[in-house]
């Protein structure tokens, strides 16, 4: 296509499709997104939180990316060497599940049909397709990404670093393999970490069973919500101090589901006042039971398979049944055997897998773990120093510290094929474990661990892998851009990702990974609900862009946001953003049409003529205020507040006021200095408006910048957010704007036709205002005549013979004769009507006040109120009759 930034006349209407088409490619072709480490500028680095290659970007991604890109463009305009790093995440469970479902739907195949290598090859094809989709969406959003740094979390160099980190942590005693209770996702058949479990209140039942004592008619009553795990019970447990059950210590009972004989033991874990005071102990299917089993040296058999079905050890009636199907059968059979006592309906907290929404099973399994306590201490200690990472809002630092103060070892192994395969091997005969960067020799004697690492293990290294960190190797590029400047992310992954990046970076580089963390919330629908497929309330950002443009979407997301808070999507507000951009378009078109063909911006001319017109000085001073204020707000991540300041300046001060005032100046044929300075000011302010808005709306600002006469640079991205020039103050000018507003309001209230010229007399002026009006009135009346077809005079009107309306303005008044805007016959008719109304009211008051019952029964205040009305009506009628007589 032709150069996207070739200058063409601005169309009459703002068309976002035409404005945004081809512009991103033009930026890329001119390498405007490239960082420049040799420039000598201070670096500013942001890493894209890598989206999963499972599909398309959602509105939450768009919000996150808009914040990041706005910061990058803002800092670039403020003279920083900016680096915005793109990347993608392999997303182990999520991607494997998607691809497997896709293969089954398309070809009826499961991963086992293809084998590990064949299945992974299919996932790589998927990855390439969706990576390109995401890149296209980044382009639609206008993200100024330096694609030379793009990383994928399964790239070879990333895998090398992941293996190095794993081996180092293992050798240093911070990674271990053990058989422990983990959260097990039966549908995915893999362990998941604690924070991948979502707890929800769920209706359920508490089931009560008899555990009959051997050789006795006596029994102990035991309650459980998971009867299907009873097959793996190893004992019953009571508190050693519970007087009710001391006689049962060491006794044997019969398990009602399989008739196994198990002992009754004592352990202080059991609370005497909870439930029946007797609990069953299933060490392989409950984390607390596991600890009891460790203390009492109990066996730990499993009664569930990896897919949630019951094992063969449960007997032929139950083997292979789904856990919930088996639960129903247990209830049925124990009722028949009269060992079932009762069931109570309850609502309890149940853990669900974040990825599959399957109810999670506590499950004894051999897994790899990271020992968290030493790593958590690194974070806690670092956040006490003056080098600590700053969180915005600050309260989220406390969220981080709360988690770090109660660390649980991190389960990092996953029973998947897609991901970083664990660099551990097992000797086929001796079962010895070898962990290393290379396979042990001879390789035929060893078998590699089939599991892969939790996706977050590699994501935790994101700041290191994207900037090329290598252990014990100098890297000037890494040193220049690390630590990164700001991490922008949602509060829902502070522990998933933020905390892990912090302790991995502190451990391996002895530096923080980022200086600041900007936390945002979730995008919700207009009712405040989380967007989800089940509710059908999701919004595709690409659909919004198609309808309103990327600039309108970005402007809405940025100006509607408050750090740390959720955001409600509102299409009406997106439309309002589009309307604002259309206003900017129309204003720009007006400005460009006022300029002669040979116009060249010259700041010196503007400054030389700074006394030529107060309107120009006023808008330049307002520009300085808004640029300084919005700059400080963006530096504090307050995009919503900054956006409101810029919006108010553009819409109200520049478009609604200054352009209208400028029309008067441009029509001044007697003073070329006024015309010239106004043209210069229009362009100067517009250029700085475009610079201020560029981080919010990059496409339209680039397009309008290209229309500037002789722009200073190839692109607005090369411009500088300047501290605007200081110009002579205009302390009196806001008074003129107030006068215009008052007169506009008056004309609207009185429905006075625009063609009617009004002359207002100034009354009750103090010495200061007399001086102001004597000096300003000639110029101000030019504006008043043009904008509200009115003028002000200092001459006195004969108040005794003239019907006047007074408008209060500060400490003085504007007075205008009614006759100026109402004809005599109309005024006479109004007076007659008013006279009749007053006479009716006077007659009504007379009747009330002459009524003895009213005077006797009414409250004194009510009587006084009516008397006052009567006196007021009489005074008004007297005054009106005098006016009518005079006429």
Image (spheres, rainbow, N blue to C red):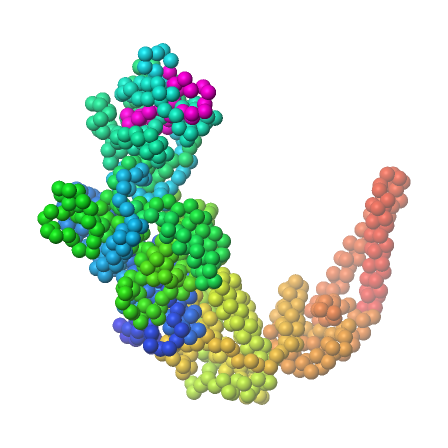
| Residue 719 x, y percent position in the rendering | 41, 76
Q: Quadrant of the N terminus?
A: bottom left
- Point 40% across, 55% down: residue: 378
Q: Is residue 102 above or below residue 386?
A: above
Residue 703, quarter of the rendered image: bottom left
| Residue 93 x, y percent position in the rendering | 27, 47
- 882 sits to left or right of 584: right
Q: Quadrant of the C terminus?
A: bottom right
Q: Is residue 731 above or below residue 65?
A: below
- 613 sits to left or right of 48: right
220 within the magenta span: yes
38 within the magenta span: no
- Point 44% across, 73% down: residue: 78
- 32 sits to left or right of 416: right
| Residue 71 x, y percent position in the rendering | 42, 66
Q: Which residues are magenta?
A: 219-248
């Amino acid at each position: 296509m032709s150069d996207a930034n070739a200058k063409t006349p601005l169309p009459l209407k703002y068309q976002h499709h035409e404005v945004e088409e081809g512009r991103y490619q033009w930026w890329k072709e001119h390498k405007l997104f490239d960082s420049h480490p040799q420039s000598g500028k201070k670096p500013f680095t942001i890493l894209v939180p890598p989206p999963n290659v499972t599909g398309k970007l959602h509105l939450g991604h768009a919000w996150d990316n808009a914040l990041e890109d706005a910061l990058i463009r803002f800092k670039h305009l403020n003279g920083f060497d900016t680096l915005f790093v793109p990347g993608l995440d392999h997303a182990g469970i999520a991607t494997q599940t998607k691809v497997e479902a896709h293969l089954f739907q398309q070809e009826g195949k499961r991963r086992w049909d293809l084998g590990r290598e064949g299945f992974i090859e299919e996932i790589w094809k998927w990855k390439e397709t969706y990576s390109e989709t995401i890149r296209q969406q980044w382009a639609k959003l206008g993200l100024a990404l330096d694609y030379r740094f793009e990383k994928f979390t399964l790239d070879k160099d990333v895998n090398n670093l992941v293996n190095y980190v794993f081996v180092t942590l293992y050798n240093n005693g911070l990674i271990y393999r053990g058989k422990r209770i983990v959260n097990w996702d039966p549908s995915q058949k893999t362990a998941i970490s604690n924070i991948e479990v979502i707890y929800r209140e769920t209706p359920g039942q508490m089931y009560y069973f008899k555990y009959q004592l051997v050789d006795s008619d006596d029994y102990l009553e035991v309650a459980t919500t998971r009867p299907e795990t009873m097959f793996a019970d190893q004992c019953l447990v009571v508190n050693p101090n519970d007087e009710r059950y001391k006689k049962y210590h060491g006794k044997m009972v019969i398990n009602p589901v399989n008739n196994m004989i198990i002992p009754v033991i004592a352990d202080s874990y059991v609370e005497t006042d909870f439930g029946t005071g007797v609990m069953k102990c299933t060490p392989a299917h409950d984390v607390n039971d596991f600890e009891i089993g460790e203390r009492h040296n109990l066996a730990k058999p499993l009664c569930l398979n990896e897919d949630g079905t019951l094992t063969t050890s449960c007997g032929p009636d139950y083997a292979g049944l789904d856990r919930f199907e088996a639960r129903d059968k247990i209830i049925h059979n124990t009722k028949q055997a009269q060992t079932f006592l009762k069931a109570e309906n309850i609502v309890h907290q149940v853990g669900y897998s974040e990825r599959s929404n399957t109810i999670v099973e506590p499950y004894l399994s051999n897994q790899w773990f990271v020992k968290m306590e030493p790593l958590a201490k690194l974070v806690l200690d670092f956040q006490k120093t003056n080098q600590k990472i700053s969180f915005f809002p600050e309260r989220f630092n406390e969220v981080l510290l709360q988690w770090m103060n109660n660390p649980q070892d991190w389960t990092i192994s996953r029973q998947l094929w897609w991901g970083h395969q664990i660099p551990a091997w097992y000797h086929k005969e001796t079962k010895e474990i070898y962990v290393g960067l290379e396979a042990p020799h001879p390789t035929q004697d060893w078998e590699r661990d089939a599991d892969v690492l939790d996706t977050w293990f590699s994501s935790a290294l994101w700041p290191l892998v994207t900037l090329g960190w290598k252990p014990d190797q100098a890297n000037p590029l890494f040193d220049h851009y690390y630590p990164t400047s700001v991490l922008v992310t949602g509060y829902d992954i502070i522990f998933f990702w933020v905390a892990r990046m912090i302790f991995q970076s502190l451990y391996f580089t002895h530096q923080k990974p980022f200086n600041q963390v900007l936390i945002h919330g979730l995008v919700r629908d207009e009712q405040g609900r989380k967007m989800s497929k089940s509710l059908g309330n999701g919004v595709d950002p690409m659909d919004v862009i198609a309808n309103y443009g990327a600039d309108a979407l970005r402007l809405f997301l940025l100006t509607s946001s408050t750090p740390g808070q959720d955001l409600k999507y509102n299409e009406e507000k997106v439309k309002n953003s589009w309307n604002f951009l259309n206003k900017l378009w129309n204003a720009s078109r007006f400005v460009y049409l006022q300029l002669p063909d040979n116009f060249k911006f010259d700041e010196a001319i503007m400054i030389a003529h700074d006394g030529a017109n107060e309107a120009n000085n006023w808008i330049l001073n307002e520009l300085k205020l808004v640029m300084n204020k919005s700059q400080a707000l963006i530096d504090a991540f307050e995009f919503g507040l900054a956006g409101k300041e810029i919006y108010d300046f553009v819409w109200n001060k520049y478009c609604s006021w200054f352009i209208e005032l400028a029309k008067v100046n441009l029509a001044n044929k007697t003073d070329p200095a006024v015309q010239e300075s106004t043209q210069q000011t229009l362009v100067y302010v517009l250029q700085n408006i475009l610079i201020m808005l560029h981080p919010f709306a990059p496409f339209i600002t680039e397009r309008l910048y290209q229309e500037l006469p002789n722009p200073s640079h190839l692109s607005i991205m090369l411009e500088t957010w300047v501290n605007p020039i200081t110009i002579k103050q205009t302390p009196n000018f806001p008074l003129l704007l107030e006068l215009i507003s008052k007169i506009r309001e008056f004309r609207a209230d009185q429905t006075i036709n625009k063609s009617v010229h009004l002359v207002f007399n100034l009354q009750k002026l103090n010495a200061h205002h007399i001086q102001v009006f004597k000096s300003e009135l000639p110029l101000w009346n030019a504006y008043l005549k043009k904008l509200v077809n009115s003028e002000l005079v200092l001459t006195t009107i004969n108040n005794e013979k003239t019907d006047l309306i007074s408008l209060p303005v500060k400490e003085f008044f504007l007075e205008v004769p009614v006759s100026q805007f109402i004809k005599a016959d109309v005024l006479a008719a109004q007076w007659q009507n008013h006279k009749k109304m007053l006479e009716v009211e006077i007659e009504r008051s007379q009747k009330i006040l002459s009524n003895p019952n009213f005077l006797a029964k009414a409250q004194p205040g009510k009587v006084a109120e009516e008397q006052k009305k009567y006196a007021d009506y009489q005074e008004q009628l007297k005054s009106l009759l005098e006016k009518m007589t005079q006429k």
